[in-house]
Image (cartoon, rainbow, N blue to C red):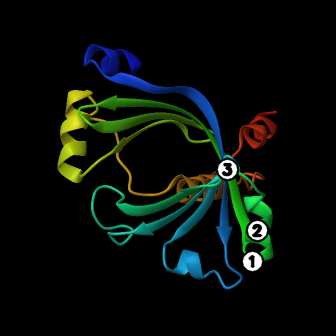
């Protein structure tokens, strides 16, 4: 994929880096019931993802994202003191490219493998996928978290988190 991106004059915006995220839930499971996701990424970026198209509808996942960057303080402790519980931890290696005003992420995800994420509207995503010669690849509108839970159940994994340490433990 990197070769195809480079041939199309894509710009590497951020080289391969490890992202660590924690998903939070309130005491009554209200966020999940509304298909909302509260995520703390790399200890300082808090994001709320809200669906704009109901899950399972449409070919692609469409969500509104509200993000805040916090430069000081313990966000994790704040969330726990507010009554949120850690629901799930996950990691991914991510490389970010830009082409024609769109963001293309190359992700390496424990248990799930390599994933290409294209951010944009549905028509633009279709055109970009064609340009990047991805037409035959499977698309999904399901989150990494839900994909992992389905995979873990099907494979009867002991792992409850989608981390590289958990993957290495399962493989040993």
Is residue 135 in view from this perspective?
no
Q: Nearer the viewer, mark 3 or mark 1?
A: 3
Residue 85's image quarter? Answer: bottom right
Q: Are marks 2 and 1 in contact (CB under 8 Å)?
A: yes
- Crowding at dot 3, Cα within 10 Å, few <14 / some 14-19 / many 20+, comes out as few
Q: Nearer the viewer, mark 3 or mark 2?
A: 3
Q: From mark 3 to mark 1, how far is it between C-alphas?
A: 19 Å
Name the spot of residue 84 as percent of width and height, x first. 72, 74
* Quadrant (top left/top right/bottom left/bottom right) for the C terminus: top right
Q: From mark 3 to mark 2, how far is it between C-alphas?
A: 14 Å
User: In the rendered view, does 91 fall on the left or right side of 133?
Assistant: right
Q: From mark 2 to mark 1, how far is it between C-alphas?
A: 6 Å
User: In the rendered view, does 102 fall on the left or right side of 158?
Assistant: left
- Crowding at dot 2, Cα within 10 Å, few <14 / some 14-19 / many 20+, comes out as few
Q: Which residue is mark 1?
A: 82
Is residue 27 in view from this perspective?
yes
Name the spot of residue 159 as percent of width and height, x first. 76, 51
Residue 30's image quarter? Answer: bottom right
Q: Which residue is mark 3?
A: 71
- Crowding at dot 1, Cα within 10 Å, few <14 / some 14-19 / many 20+, comes out as few
Q: Earlier in the sequence, mark 3 or mark 1?
A: 3
Q: Are marks 3 and 2 in contact (CB under 8 Å)?
A: no
Residue drawn at x 39%, y 62% as measured from the top left: 63
What secondary structure is marked by label 1? loop
Which label number is shown at residue 78? Answer: 2
Frontmost residue, 114 versus 136:
114
Q: Earlier in the sequence, mark 3 or mark 2?
A: 3
* Quadrant (top left/top right/bottom left/bottom right) for the N terminus: top left
Residue drawn at x 67%, y 67% as measured from the top left: 24
Residue drawn at x 37%, y 35% as measured from the top left: 104
């Amino acid at each position: 994929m990197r070769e195809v991106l480079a041939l199309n004059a894509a710009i590497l915006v951020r080289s391969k880096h490890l992202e660590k995220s924690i998903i939070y839930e309130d005491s009554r499971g209200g966020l999940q019931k509304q298909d909302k996701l509260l995520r703390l990424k790399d200890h300082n970026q808090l994001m709320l993802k809200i669906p704009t198209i109901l899950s399972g509808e449409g070919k692609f996942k469409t969500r509104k994202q509200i993000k805040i960057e916090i430069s000081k303080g313990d966000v994790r402790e704040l969330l726990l003191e507010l009554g949120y519980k850690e629901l799930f931890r996950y990691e991914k290696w991510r490389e970010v490219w830009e082409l024609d005003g769109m963001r293309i992420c190359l992700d390496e995800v424990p248990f799930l493998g390599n994933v290409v994420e294209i951010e944009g509207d549905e028509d633009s995503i279709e055109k970009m996928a064609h340009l990047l010669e991805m037409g035959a690849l499977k698309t999904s509108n399901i989150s990494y978290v839900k994909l992992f839970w389905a995979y873990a159940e099907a494979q009867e994994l002991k792992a409850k988190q989608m981390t590289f340490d958990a993957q290495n433990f399962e493989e040993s």
